């Protein structure tokens, strides 16, 4: 059900409970509203994270939004939603708080659930950020393998903006490791994917990287 339908269902549950005398009707209503609240919390947290990426200022509402989403999805038994929320929690701690120790188990749990549920998109995000964690820890080989897995998943999904971002990360790593020709080729592929999908934000990242590579 979409958001409007879940609100209507909750209202009907109230009517059935109060006027119809159905003592179990509110269970359905609470479930519908928990599901809606989880989706809203996740969506709000993602918007706040986008604001952080532009402003580089933490919004105190971002972490509680992702925590609430994770709590509700777990209560609902919604593995797909839980995997997404766990990824964003891990991403928050890794990107906003620069706290790899807190981020890694959240990202790993997201990755594990996404694999179990066949959620390739969330898997591509989780493994990408696990790759960044490996690179930060000094394990370049493991980091590269994970970034390559993310790129492969996104290519298979046809997720061109995400593929461009993945190729950019691989290009930057290749440049840091002295593989200049490979870095240039990856950067060109990244720019093509970003241009095809009109991902202007990613194009800006790529153009900034081209100055350094």
Image (cartoon, rainbow, N blue to C red):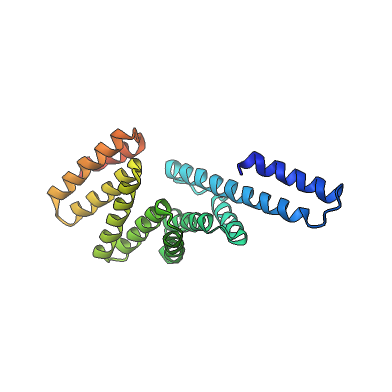
In the displayed structure, 180 sits above or below 74; it is above
Q: Is residue 16 left or right of residue 162?
A: right
**How far across and how far down the image is residue 9, in percent?**
71, 44
Q: Residue at x 68, y 54 (%)?
A: 31
Q: Residue at x 78, y 57 (%)?
A: 24
**How far across and how far down the image is residue 43, in percent?**
54, 45
Q: Residue at x 81, y 48 (%)?
A: 16
- Is residue 207 visible in the rendered image? The answer is no
Q: Is residue 42 left or right of residue 19?
A: left
Question: In what quadrant of the picture does the N terminus appear?
Answer: top right
- Front in this rendered view, residue 165 or 138: 165
- Is residue 143 visible in the rendered image? The answer is yes
Q: Is residue 44 left or right of residue 140?
A: right
Question: In what quadrant of the picture does the C terminus appear?
Answer: top left
Numbered circles on residues, count? 0
Q: Is residue 8 left or right of residue 205?
A: right
Most distant residue in the left direction: 181
**How far across and how far down the image is residue 66, in percent?**
55, 54
**How far across and how far down the image is residue 59, in percent?**
53, 48
> Quarter-wise, where is residue 99 in the image?
bottom left
- Front in this rendered view, residue 178 or 37: 37
């Amino acid at each position: 059900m979409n958001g409007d339908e879940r609100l209507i269902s909750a209202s009907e549950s109230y009517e059935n409970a109060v006027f119809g005398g159905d003592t179990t009707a509110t269970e359905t209503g609470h479930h519908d509203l928990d599901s809606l609240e989880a989706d809203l919390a996740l969506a709000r947290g993602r918007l706040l994270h986008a604001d952080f990426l532009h402003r580089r200022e933490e919004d105190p509402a971002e972490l509680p939004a992702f925590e609430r989403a994770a709590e509700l999805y777990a209560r609902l038994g919604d593995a797909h939603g839980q995997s997404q929320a766990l990824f964003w929690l891990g991403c928050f701690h890794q990107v906003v708080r620069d706290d790899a120790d807190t981020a890694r188990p959240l990202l790993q749990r997201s990755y594990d659930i996404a694999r179990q549920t066949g959620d390739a998109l969330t898997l591509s995000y989780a493994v990408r950020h696990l790759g960044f964690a490996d690179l930060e820890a000094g394990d370049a080989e493991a980091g590269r393998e994970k970034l390559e897995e993310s790129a492969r998943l996104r290519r298979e999904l046809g997720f061109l903006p995400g593929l461009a971002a993945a190729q950019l990360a691989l290009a930057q790593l290749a440049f840091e490791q002295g593989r200049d020709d490979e870095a240039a080729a990856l950067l060109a592929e990244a720019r093509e994917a970003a241009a095809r999908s009109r991902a202007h934000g990613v194009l800006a990242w790529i153009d900034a990287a081209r100055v350094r590579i």
